[in-house]
Amino acid sequence: MSHSAIPNNMYCASAGIYERVKNGYFIPESLAAMLEAQGILNSGSLSQQDHQVIKLLVSEKSGCDGWMAAHNLDSDLTALPVDAQGAIRAGQPTGDARRDALARFVSHLQTTSDTMKEDEFNAIRAAGYTDAQLAEISLTVALDIFINTFNRIIGDARPAE
């Protein structure tokens, strides 16, 4: 993986580990795969606001309170309104039907383990999300869970090996 493939918006990686990755000092295959997947998502069809909705929800649900500031900053940069950010974190409607459908869908994915019911699937499709975007939503959820978990392991203060 080339250094240019590392996404510029590494939204939740701690500064220390990201610097080591960026400078080529540390890049295990699992982290390289995650960075590659993030690069693919960056060129996908979901909007940056959609990604931020997902990231805010995943971090909120997984208790990633240490990284909420980073997600909030990214949300500010992608023009996700501050009131919408608060509503998303609180599980409340934002007033945007498509965004609210995405938030309900992602929340459902995170709080259930059963197969998606037809009415839930139909609701996200009725909001205009395509099959390809459903795959991107799933990958965004998975990557954010990976990043949150990895950051819990490494913390900000772990010395380089």
Image (cartoon, helix red, strand yellow):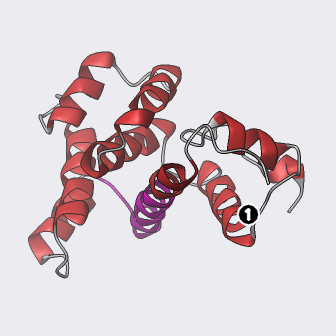
Based on the picture, tell me whether residue 161 belongs to the magenta stretch. Answer: no
Q: Residues within 10 Å of mark 1 (few under 14, many from 20)?
A: some
Q: Please provide percent x and percent y for residue 30.
A: 67, 70
Q: Please provide percent x and percent y for residue 34.
A: 63, 62
Residue in the foreground of this view, choosing between 104 and 15: 15
> Which of the image's four quarters has the N terminus?
bottom right
Residue in the foreground of this view, choosing between 115 and 142: 142
Could you tell me the amino acid type at mark 1?
Ala
**Where is mark 1, residue-wise?**
32
Is residue 84 toward the left or the right of residue 156 in the image? left
Is residue 47 toward the left or the right of residue 101 in the image? right
The residue lying at 23 percent from left, 25 percent from top is 86
Q: Is residue 103 above or below residue 125?
A: above
- Which region shows up in magenta? 128-146
Which of the 4 image quadrants contains residue 157?
Answer: top right
Based on the picture, tell me whether residue 133 belongs to the magenta stretch. Answer: yes
> Which of the image's four quarters has the C terminus?
bottom right
Number of labels in the image equals 1
